[in-house]
Each structure stands twice: as structure tokens, then as C-alpha cells.
Image (cartoon, coloured by chain):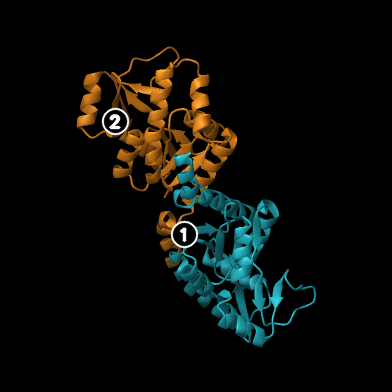
Chain colours: A cyan, B orange
Amino acid sequence: MKRRGLLIVISGPSGAGKSTICRELLRSYGENLELSVSATTRKPRDGEYEGVNYFFKDIEEFAKMAGNGEFIEYAKVYDNYYGTPRKYVMDKLGEGKSVILEIDVQGGMKVKEAFSEAVFIFIMPPSFEDLRRRIENRGTETEQDICKRMKNAYSEINYATYYDYIVVNNDIKEAAAKISCIITAEKCRYKRCNIEFENFREG
Amino acid sequence: MKRRGLLIVISGPSGAGKSTICRELLRSYGENLELSVSATTRKPRDGEYEGVNYFFKDIEEFAKMAGNGEFIEYAKVYDNYYGTPRKYVMDKLGEGKSVILEIDVQGGMKVKEAFSEAVFIFIMPPSFEDLRRRIENRGTETEQDICKRMKNAYSEINYATYYDYIVVNNDIKEAAAKISCIITAEKCRYKRCNIEFENFREG
């Protein structure tokens, strides 16, 4: 029997570097790892492909899927809906792949209710000064926007207590290596391998 | 303030390859890692040095240390006593080094009572057939000894349930790499970094 993969939830305040770390994680440790593909009612942008970046749905399809319990979690962000398709994730886990879910803390809490056996990792910026600098350096934000994002960051960080691991993003490669180690370690946890282990004891 | 190291308890049936894995772990990932040095009433053998292989004590000194609570755990094995000196371990942890304690399951259970925050790793042979082969290949054992060792192995493996992680020794280097990952992951656990993290939140 193929061993199931792990569901890895990665959250953290915007600007902490989640997406960059996830890309590096897949690039350097991508064997048996998949990034979850969300469903969305947002229109595809140039260069976005169905099933690669998103599963594009119209609002009726999305509502029907939500009604049928086909999402592990979903949320409305501004005018669009985003959801994590249960079947896609379960299929990958069944193939023995671990699935990365890059998701906000509210989504993370919903996954925790549905999948308590998932691994919850919170990415922290090295400091608030660093976070502010990163947000400012984007150069696209007004002072008001920056304040709002910083306030959100404070409030998101309060959820870190519900996560199993804290990875501080001092360095992208180092942070990705730590997450890869967390995945390796979690696969060795007694509670995850005791089924195989029972077989061994009887063997 | 320097961050404290982790106490890592490594157990497993004799013949599973614990000592070889620990040597490889120190060789390849030895930075900030120390193997605990036990105290013993056994006489030094050729090539064994005080403070390197053991702290050699006479029976009166050992008994006095035991009486003063200077051991995290101690046990009599055949005619000699062996103990893990609390001060040595605490000093290394205070220096920020993680300390490896290679110890039998009875010792492991005593450490668990005294140091619940330690990390408990159980080394498993790939199979009982493999374990039997390794014990037989030593060539020094009678059939009766082999049976006794195998029986002990069965009984030791029942303790694996009290360990946090199971590392199967299919390959020495792979097993050492997994333990190194477990140490990295454990340092990221929320429960271990929330003190630093509280500072961050106030900062």
C-alpha cells in the first residue's frame, strides 16, 4: 500500500515571503510535493492556465461545489471566491504526494477543523521593521495602505499560536530547507507511522 | 540570550544500528551537537579517556552522586553502574548545544519523567529478519544468545509507542539525515520558540 502524503498548511502575514519560500521549496525539494491548485471565480489573467494556476469556475459552479461540500475551505476575497478543492487534494495525498496549501490564517483555521492531522507552518518575518520595509519596497502602496497591512500583520500573527511550527524567514533557501526538514520529520512521527509499525510488530 | 539546545534521546533494540547512526550524525551534522558522556564504575579499557568516553568513578563516588540526584538516570548493567550526569548535560544545553543520549528504553523512560521536553527517537531495524542477520553476523553469539537478543528486541520495540519519532535504519546516512531533520524541525516547533516569539510580538 502506498503511504499517504502529508497536507502542509503554510500561512503568515502578507510580505513575510510565503510565495517565494513555497517556490524555492518546490524547486529544491519538489519530489513528492505538490502546490494545491485553488478554484476561483476570478477571471484568468494572461499567462494563467486552467488546472495549473487555478481551476476557473463561474459563480454558479462555485456555489454548487460549495453546497456539495467539495471544498476543504473557501472564502470571498474582495469580489471573488477562492476555494481548496477537496478531491484534488485527496487524490494527490492518495498518490503519496504531500500537498502544500498556501493560505491565510482564516483558511488555515478551517483546514484545522477538517484535517487536524495536517501540518501547520507559520512563516514569520525576521522583525516588524523588516516586514514594513518589504511592504514599502513594493512601492505601490500609500502610507494608509502600509498602515493597514501592518495592522493586519499584527492581527494575523496572533494566530501563530494555532500552528505547529514557526519558520522565520531570515533567508529564503534556509526557510525552504527548514520546511523540507519539517516534512521529513513529520513523516517519522510515531503517530503517523504506527500503522506500518503495527505490521512490523506482527511480522 | 543564547537559545538552549535540545536533549535528544535515541533508543532502539541492540543491533538496530544506534551507535553507527550516532557516529554518522556527529560526523555529518555535528555542529552544535554533543554526545552525552556517561559516568561509570567500569574500569577504563585501553584507548578510553576520562571525560571523552566516560567519567570513570569508583563505586563510592557513583553512589554519592546518585544519592545527591546528580544523575538524570542511572542503571546497573551486569556488574557495573552507568549514569547520565545532570550537570554535564545541562551545561551543554545552556551553551546552546543539543545533546544526544544513546540509551536503552528503560533509561529513556526515566529521562521522559525528568525531561518531558526532550525529543524521543526510536531506531528500528528494517525488519526482524534483518535484525537477526545483523546479530548473527557478529559471529560471537551462540544460538541461545541470539534467541535471547531477539526476545529482548521484541520487548524493547513495545516501548516505541512512548517515543516521538520512529527512524527505520534502511541506510545509515539516510537515518542520520532524518535525525538531523528532526532536530531542525523540533527547533521550529511553536512550543519551543514561543518565548522568543512573545518578544517579537512585543517588539
* Residue A24 % position (x, y): 67, 57
Give the vertical position of B6 relative to B148 (above or below).
below
Give the alpha-carbon distance from disc 2 to disc 1, as whole Å. Answer: 33 Å
Residue B18's disc number:
none
| Chain assignment, label 2 | B
Q: Residues within 10 Å of mark 2 (few under 14, many from 20)?
A: many
**Residue to which mark 1 is pinned:** A164
- Three-letter amino acid code of the residue under disc 1: Asp
* Residue B106 % position (x, y): 32, 35
* Image quarter of residue A126: bottom right
**Residue to which mark 2 is pinned:** B74
- Residue at 43 percent across and 28 percent down: it is B14
Whether residue B99 appears in this view of the structure is yes
Image-based side of B201 in relation to B61, left or right: right
Whether residue A125 appears in this view of the structure is no
- Residue at 55 percent across and 64 percent down: it is A9
Exactly how many numbered labels are in the figure?
2
Q: Secondary structure at mark 2?
A: strand
* Residue A185 % position (x, y): 52, 49
Give the vertical position of A156 relative to A183 (above or below).
below
Query: In which quadrant is the C terminus of chain B drawn?
Result: bottom left
